[in-house]
Image (spheres, rainbow, N blue to C red):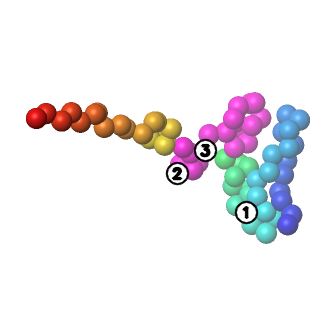
Amino acid sequence: MKRWCKTIRGTRHYFGDLDDWKGALERYQATRDDLQAGRTPRPAPGEGVSVEAKAPPKVNPPQYVTH
C-alpha cells in the first residue's frame, strides 16, 4: 500500500492512500496551515472526541432504605 506523505517542519505526516489521492489532497489542504504553523491540526467535524466521551460516567446517589 502506498501512502501520500509530506515532511513539514522536519516531521513526516501521512494523509492517505495514493489510491484515493483526491481524499489525501483534501486532508492535506485542510491541515496544511496548522502543520506549517507548528500547531496540532483540529479534527474534522465528527472525528474528534466529544466532551461527553471524556467526562466520567454519572453516578447515581446512594439509595437509603427507611423502615
Q: Residue at x 60, y 44 (%)?
A: 43
Indicate the amino acid at tag 2: Gly
- Judging depth in this view, the residue of 50 and 5 nearest the camera is 50
For label 2, the crowd category at 10 Å Cα-Cα, with few meaning under 14, some 14 to 19 and many 20 or more, is few
1 versus 66 height, above or below: below
| Residue under pointer 3 | 43
Horizontally, residue 45 falls left or right of residue 67, namely right
Quadrant (top left, top right, bottom left, bottom right) of the N terminus:
bottom right
Q: Quadrant of residue 56?
A: top left
Q: Which residues are magenta?
A: 31-49
Indicate the amino acid at tag 1: Lys
Q: Residue at the top extreme?
A: 38
Q: Quadrant of residue 34?
A: top right
Q: Secondary structure at mark 3?
A: loop
Which badge, 1 or 3, is on the more N-terminal residue? 1
Q: Secondary structure at mark 1?
A: helix
**Callout in the foreground (1, 2):** 2
| Residue under pointer 2 | 46
Q: CA distance from mark 1 to mark 3?
A: 19 Å
Q: Residue at the bottom extreme?
A: 19
Does residue 6 belong to the magenta stretch? no
| Residue under pointer 1 | 22
Q: CA distance from mark 1 to mark 2?
A: 20 Å
**Callout in the foreground (1, 3):** 3
